[in-house]
């Protein structure tokens, strides 16, 4: 199939089938259409050679504006060099912005909170779960009219997605970047089908939880040193709802003191009009999940050692794991890095529709101390998406030095280190799926994979922990120290959970849930107005 025909097919699928995302239609129908019409990245004209249509608000004679961008990730010799030289020079020449970039280690959220509270002027990598920073006034709100004025190409890159997911008290507080199909995130498995084939199994034969357990047992017998799953968080909670909730409840964990299987608050997406929150840890479903994980530990599929997650984290990439959390791209892309002979397939055992919980991974937020520069930050983000050349430059670096195109149009990363993370910035506006490399029907299925998903009723909801800060802190400590191990099968649920529940109650669980219910009910009521 020729490139243009394939592009037309994919674009038609996007234009007719894609869901409305976060439900914010204020980007304008013209912008939404533009993003949908370029779903495969193929356009009548090469976006890399198109003119930068970003608003020109730069006075060539004015002194450069200083901005400081903080990205999570380990700095390397090349990333430091790139941000200090080629990146700095291009942003300065194109926007008259003196941009410095700092790479900050993952897991340093507390340090970031301190920096925001101290009044540092920064733009920084952010996820919506850090919404308490916005409630505390540490993040600058972004005016919608200013966004439309200064970042039209960025809005086009957002396509059908909006800003409900990053709106708190009616104000946009993060600029989300990724705009790609995302409803399958952590709701299915990537499976090494080539490994299954060696024990006379195939992904197509696995229809139930019992089928999967039988297949895993066969693999484990033949390959005892192989990891079954390369990462354990939310394994049963998201993957096996058909097993622990066969009557059709669709549980979605909300922002909680514990972000794993054992979160304290969930909602049932199968009841879209209900404002009820569910005390998750006192449900029979939660007990079933913990006991299932105990079984996996007993069988050797998970390990009770608390360091399991760290040790297993790289197993998938190195070819030493049977399962990994599903990525939507494996609907068409069945390869695994440089693992020779790997055949990766997608497995979803759920009998429920997929749920779109967030329509992006991360975004850029601006510290309240740098509120005067919101406009300049919007000019910069618009510049990132103004042409495909800029888009590829920010994601991958200098063409020919850091990356190059393969013959099929895919990207070969010469420099493997992260710049402005590609998983964070992808957009259907510029992404191309190489023709001739993948099955056109599977490519079409990928672009349509969000078609029948459910938009979470909690999209746009953010819990303000301020009224129960003391209780939340106490609950967090108990969850981390005593509840989380049970959710990973480390212990005996029947014996160990009752005293943990007593501690949660003593720490203010009921008060916390009451406040959560109050806020979520208000949120749902306001949605209906």
Image (spheres, rainbow, N blue to C red):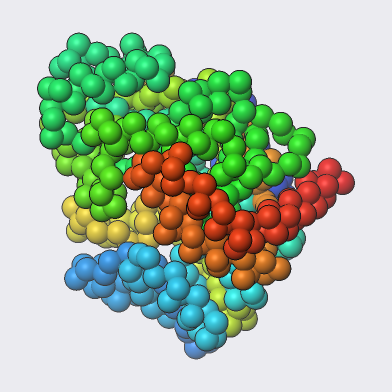
Q: Is residue 464 left or right of residue 353?
A: right
Note whether 206 is above or below 269 in the view shown. above
Note whether 336 is above or below 28 in the view shown. above
At which x and y percent is residue 173?
Answer: 62, 64
Q: Is residue 109 left or right of residue 355?
A: left
Residue 339 occupies quadrant: top left
- Towards the viewer: 28 or 121: 121
- Towards the viewer: 158 or 304: 304
Work out which quarter of the rendered image holds the N terminus and state it: top left
At which x and y percent is residue 11?
Answer: 52, 29
Residue drawn at point x = 46 percent, y = 28 percent: 240
Residue drawn at point x = 48 percent, y = 46 percent: 497
Residue drawn at point x = 28 percent, y = 45 percent: 304
Q: Is residue 383 left or right of residue 106?
A: right
Residue drawn at point x = 72 percent, y = 34 percent: 272
Toward the right, the furthest residue is: 529
At which x and y percent is residue 81?
Answer: 24, 73
At which x and y percent is residue 435?
Answer: 33, 27
């Amino acid at each position: 199939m020729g490139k243009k025909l394939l592009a037309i097919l994919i674009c038609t699928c996007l234009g007719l089938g894609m869901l409305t995302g976060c439900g914010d239609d204020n980007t304008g129908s013209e912008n939404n259409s533009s993003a949908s019409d370029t779903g495969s990245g193929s356009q009548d004209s090469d976006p890399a050679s198109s003119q930068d249509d970003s608003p020109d608000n730069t006075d060539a004679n004015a002194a450069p504006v200083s901005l400081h961008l903080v990205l999570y990730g380990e700095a390397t010799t090349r990333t430091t060099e790139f941000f200090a030289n080629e990146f700095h020079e291009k942003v300065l020449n194109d926007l008259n912005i003196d941009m410095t970039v700092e790479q900050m280690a993952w897991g340093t959220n507390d340090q970031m909170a301190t920096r925001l509270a101290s009044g540092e002027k920064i733009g920084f990598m952010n996820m919506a779960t850090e919404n308490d920073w916005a409630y505390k006034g540490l993040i600058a709100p972004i005016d919608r009219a200013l966004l439309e004025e200064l970042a039209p190409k960025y809005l086009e890159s957002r396509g059908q997605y909006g800003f409900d997911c990053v709106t708190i008290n009616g104000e946009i507080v993060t600029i989300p970047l990724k705009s790609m199909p995302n409803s399958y995130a952590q709701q299915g498995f990537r499976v090494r089908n080539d490994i299954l084939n060696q024990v006379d199994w195939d992904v197509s034969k696995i229809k139930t939880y019992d089928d999967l357990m039988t297949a895993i047992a066969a693999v484990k017998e033949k390959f005892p040193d192989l990891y079954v799953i390369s990462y354990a968080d939310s394994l049963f909670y998201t993957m096996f709802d058909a097993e622990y909730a066969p009557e059709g409840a669709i549980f979605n964990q909300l922002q909680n003191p514990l972000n794993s299987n054992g979160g304290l608050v969930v909602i049932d997406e199968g009841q879209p009009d209900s404002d009820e929150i569910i005390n998750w840890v006192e449900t029979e479903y939660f007990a079933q999940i913990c006991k299932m994980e105990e079984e996996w530990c007993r069988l050797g599929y998970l390990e009770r050692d608390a360091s399991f997650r760290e040790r297993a984290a790289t197993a998938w990439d190195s070819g030493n794991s049977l399962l990994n959390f599903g990525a939507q791209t494996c609907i068409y892309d069945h390869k695994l890095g440089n693992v020779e002979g790997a055949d990766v397939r997608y497995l979803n055992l759920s009998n429920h529709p997929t749920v779109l919980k967030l329509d992006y991974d991360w975004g850029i937020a601006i510290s309240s101390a740098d509120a005067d520069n919101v406009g300049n930050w919007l000019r910069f983000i618009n510049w990132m998406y103004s042409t495909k050349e800029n888009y590829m430059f920010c994601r991958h670096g200098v063409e020919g030095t850091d990356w190059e195109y393969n013959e099929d149009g895919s990207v070969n990363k010469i420099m493997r280190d992260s710049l402005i993370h590609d998983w964070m910035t992808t957009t259907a506006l510029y992404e191309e799926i190489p023709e001739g490399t993948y099955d056109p029907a599977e490519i079409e299925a990928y672009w349509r994979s969000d078609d029948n998903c459910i938009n979470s009723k909690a999209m746009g909801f953010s819990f303000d922990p301020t009224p129960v800060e003391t209780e939340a802190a106490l609950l967090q400590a108990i969850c981390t120290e005593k509840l989380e191990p049970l959710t990973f099968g480390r212990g005996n649920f029947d014996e160990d959970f009752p005293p943990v529940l007593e501690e949660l109650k003593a720490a203010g669980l009921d008060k916390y849930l009451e406040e959560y219910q109050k806020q979520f009910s208000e949120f749902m009521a306001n949605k209906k107005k």
